[in-house]
Image (cartoon, rainbow, N blue to C red):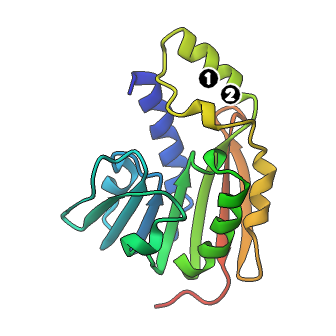
Amino acid sequence: MKSLDRLLRTWRTRVALRKMPTGADAVLDIGCGDGHLLGSLRARCREGIDPTLPRDFEVDGLRLCSGCFPGDLARLGLRGPYDAVFALAVFEHLDDQELRAARAVLPELLKPGGRLIVTVPHPLVDRILDVLMLLRLIDGQAVEEHHGFDPGRLTELASGQVRLVSRSSFQLGLNNVFVFERNGLPCS
């Protein structure tokens, strides 16, 4: 990972963490990579899933699992419920079938009042990333999987149990953060 990749990841992570519910004690990071986001938290339960991990590992309450979302959640025992579920730069990599499966499983992953925090890039970002890769300023992990994802499609994640509570942009409008919340009162 190059310096610009790390800068963009850190920026995205900071924006997302500001959306996390206060006192979140159980957190899942979908597309956790090396555990950067989870490593910055003090939550009792910190779990992550990522298809690029070479193996599963667990240390000091941090559990990272090699697998795909949403298909491998049950096999890995990642059932929740969680106070917060993060999916930073993930949904633009999912196809239509995976998006439908995500919509079905997300309410089960969240506690009542729990939040799903998602970031996705603006469609123009693909062109910018291509130039940055050409200039060797970024590694551009899995950019070929973006396929011009429309951030507006994320509103499809809202259901009878999960509602969209906020949507905003950051990084000069080139990235979007969506916050969904499971209906019901938070558990004490």
Is 129 in front, or is 167? 129
In the image, taking residue 148 as reference, residue 78 lies left or right, namely left
In the image, taking residue 185 as reference, residue 29 lies left or right, namely left
Q: What secondary structure is found at the residue carrying circle 2?
A: helix
Amino acid under disc 1: Leu
Residue 110 visible, this orientation: no
Q: Dot 2: within a 10 Å radius of its alpha carbon, few (fewer than 14), some, or many (20 or more) residues?
A: some
Q: Dot 1: within a 10 Å radius of its alpha carbon, few (fewer than 14), some, or many (20 or more) residues?
A: some
Seen at 69% across and 29% down, the residue is 125
Is 116 in front, or is 68? 68
Image vertical order of residue 89 relative to residue 132, above or below: below
Marks 2,1: beta carbons within 8 A:
yes
Residue furthest top as drawn: 135
Residue furthest left as drawn: 60
Q: Quadrant of the N terminus?
A: top left
Residue 27 visible, this orientation: yes
Amino acid under disc 2: Asp
Q: Which residue is mark 1?
A: 129
The picture quadrant where one finds residue 66 is bottom left
**Picture disc at residue 126:** 2
Residue 24: give x, y in percent of width and height.
Answer: 43, 73
In the image, taking residue 102 as reference, residue 86 lies left or right, namely left
The picture quadrant where one finds residue 89 is top right
Q: What secondary structure is found at the residue carrying circle 1?
A: helix
Residue 104: give x, y in percent of width and height.
Answer: 66, 74
The picture quadrant where one finds residue 26 is bottom left
Mark 2 and mark 1: Cα distance apart in space: 5 Å
Residue 23: give x, y in percent of width and height.
Answer: 43, 74
Seen at 39% across and 60% down, the residue is 48
Is 128 in front, or is 83? 128
Total numbered labels placed on residues in the image: 2
Seen at 27% across and 63% down, the residue is 62
